[in-house]
Amino acid sequence: MIHPGAQADPEPGGDNGINPESLLSSALTLVGEDMDRVNELIRLRLDSDIVLIRTLGTYIIRSGGKRLRPLILLLSAGTSGYRGDHHITLAAVIEFIHTATLLHDDVVDESAMRRGQPTANEVWGNGASVLVGDFLYSRAFEMMVETDRMEVMRILAKTTNAIAEGEVMQLLNAHEPDTTEETYFDTIRRKSACLFEAAARLGGLVGEQDPATCDALAGYGLHLGTAFQLVDDVMDYVTSSTEMGKDAGDDLAEGKPTLPLIHAMRTGDSAQAELVREAIRSGSRHRMEEIVEVVRDTGAIDYTLAKAQEHSRLAVGALIDLPGSGYRSALEDLARFSVSRGR
């Protein structure tokens, strides 16, 4: 079902004078009715006779997220020509899984702010956040069973397992300045990018695409998710707390050896490297201004953004044999959006 002949954008992260938000809004407009249905289904399936579940779940779901992962699934299904309803259910499932990971992450990281507002654990406490996260996971699996497709369940079971492995890897790497670039990429692949990968693959699967096309869509999602995470890790050093929706320097305070820090330690002089190493070991942002200066002076921001651009190009390249359509163009726009946020 692959149609050859379409050409990939040679510079998917290129500026071209385009507002990053316009790239996202054009994609959202294309599947606006489907996204409305996803949001309504999320609202319905958050229902529980346990008031705290409804309250906390609704709070985090409505806290301003871009619904990027459900959007990828809807666009992938669109480019596959799907006309049923399973993509709506699966898009809600993907969002529930993502939200559950956020609830658990914020507890582990002791985060106080996300998307510009207090985290659920800050408002209701760690216990409630963990347990409602568990509810969202179980509700997601309940919904995926309703599709009655073993391959869907296999993909999502494998994905949630990989996410859990990535979360454990991140915990083990915390405060460890000797974390390698290879380990870093393995961690973000499991913890973040694999859910993008699953969303894109599921769109092809429900559209009855052949294995090669499903693999191409999955490759797109994996590279897009990687680019997105790389830019997120840069934004900790170039963006204000208000713009990020979380406290600047949070990654450093949590002792996370992200790629900008790994590169800064590798290329800086001994004093610069030791400054960063000590900050990772102690999990402190009290010398944040000096560390930002080191990250900039060593070219770590440009290096990380170049890696993001590379993965954005690979994401677009993965779509090259898919038929040209508005849906495919929107997927390409998301690749541009993923890296344009970092400028």
Image (tube, helix red, strand yellow):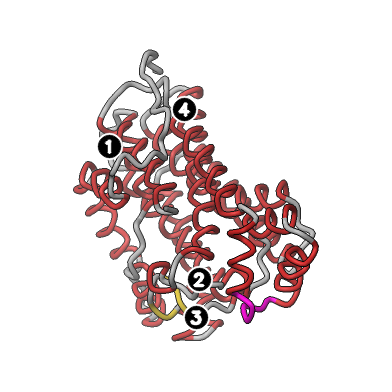
N-term mark: 3 or 1: 1
Q: Amino acid at mark 4?
A: Gly
Q: Nearer the viewer, residue 300 or 315?
A: 300
**In the rendered structure, which segment of residues is drawn in magenta?**
283-288
Label 3 neighbourhood size at 10 Å, few (<14), some (14-19), many (20+)?
A: some
Place residue 324 in its image quadrant: top left
Q: Amino acid at mark 1?
A: Gly
Q: Amino acid at mark 2?
A: Leu
Q: Amino acid at mark 3?
A: Ala
Label 4 neighbourhood size at 10 Å, few (<14), some (14-19), many (20+)?
A: many
Residue 157: image tag: none
Residue 84: image tag: 1
SS of the residue under disc 4: helix
| Residue 158 x/y as whole percent | 60, 46
The residue positioned 37% from the left and 43% from the top of the image is 334
Q: Nearer the viewer, residue 245 or 266?
A: 266
The majority secondary structure of the magenta stretch comes to loop
Residue with the mark numbered 4: 317
